[in-house]
Image (cartoon, rainbow, N blue to C red):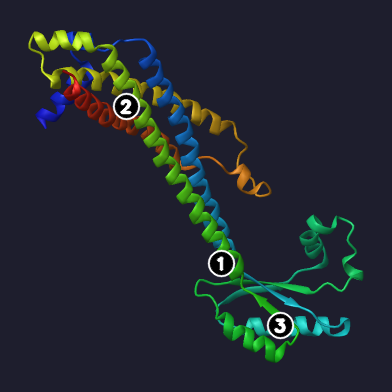
Amino acid sequence: MTIDIAKLSELVVGDTQADRVVPPTGFTARLTLFSAAAMAFLAVFALALSLATGRLAARWGDELARSSTIRISAPEGQLAAQTDAALKLLETTRGVASARALDADEQRALLEPWFGPDLPVDSLPIPQLIEVIEDNEGFDPQGLRLRLSAEVPGAVLDDHTRWRRPLAEAAGRLRLLGWVSLLLIGGATAAMITLAANAALAANAQVITVLRLVGARDVYIARAFVRRFTLRALGGAAVGMVLGCAAILLLPSAQTEGGFLTGLGFQGWHWIWPLIIPPLAAAVAFAATRAAAIRTLKDMP
């Protein structure tokens, strides 16, 4: 533990003589800071997309899993009788917590987005809808369909399976896309920092040669580059993370009628996740700079 603390202290505090090898300003410094900030900003949105997709899929999945719909199509004189028969059948069905027939206003509200607010529901042959809410155990959909076909010929059960499956698949793919985006962002960050480190090493080739002549080891020289680029990546990623979180806060809050477009953000303890981005960026910079420095120094005469 003492060695780890010493290495960490050396990384943060640094060595004044070794730090002179790395230019404090210039193209490589700006490139590192900008790359880390931009990638951290994008990482915040990729993380928010993945988490928001998971929340939305879980909410919609729970709502659809606990509810089903029975649609009754029958002649006008038989519609009320078949509706009453279906409700009585549902009262004796195991796994059904409650069931009720939707009134004309509720059915009009369901059709309004497609047909407008002036739809004459009473004068149109619209099927009667029955909302079925399951209990924790749930009911047997196949058994219920058989009972409905025998006692209520005009009834059709929709247990929302065809809605849940595409939703789960789409949510899984969007979450995967979010994580793949984070991996690509990490790879792009490593590539940009590697280019910046190589450019800095090439620009200071003469200084490195002089240090070698006076007895400096490659590990000593590489440590200076690793420290500078790691701290630059940490600072740039912190700025990008803060800007990304501020942009997330400016998005519309989650609303039922807005669906997914108003739910892109962090909720509750999920706000902890963006804080992990700067340390991860620093770790990527540490590994990329160390590999680039050791490889470049070995190739130098």
Query: In this view of the protein, which residue sits in the foreground, 244 or 32?
Result: 32
Closer to the chain start, of discs 2 and 1, is: 1
Tell me residue 165's x, y (percent).
Answer: 55, 65
Frontmost residue, 10 versus 61:
10
In the image, is 107 to the left or to the right of 68?
Answer: right
Quadrant of residue 281 in the image?
Answer: top left
Q: Residue drawn at (80%, 74%), measured in percent from left and top?
A: 127
3 vs 1, front mark: 1
Whole-number angstrom distance, CA of label 3 to CA of label 2: 69 Å
Tell whether 103 sits left or right of 63.
right
Residue 28 found in image quarter: top left
Q: Amino acid at mark 3?
A: Ala
Judged left or right of residue 129, residue 253 is left
**Residue 217 relative to residue 98: left or right:** left
Residue 65's disc is: 1
Where is residue 38? Give x, y as percent: 46, 27
Mark number for residue 194? 2
**Badge 3 or badge 2: first in the primary sequence:** 3
Residue farthest along the bottom direction in this orientation: 150
Of pointers 3 and 1, the one earlier in the residue sequence: 1
Using a 10 Å C-alpha cutoff, classify the residue at mark 1 as few (fewer than 14 neighbours), some (14 to 19) or many (20 or more).
some
Residue at the (21%, 27%) spot, across then down: 295
Q: Nearer the viewer, mark 2 or mark 1?
A: 2
Q: Is residue 229 above or below residue 54?
A: above
Residue type at numbered disc 2: Thr
- Circle 3 crowding by C-alpha within 10 Å: few under 14, some 14–19, many from 20: many
Residue drawn at (69%, 88%) of the image: 149
Query: Residue 36, image x and y in percent?
Result: 40, 26
Q: Real-space Cα distance between discs 3 and 1? A: 21 Å
Give, as a three-letter code, the residue at label 1.
Ala
Instruction: Find residue 86 and name its label.
Output: 3
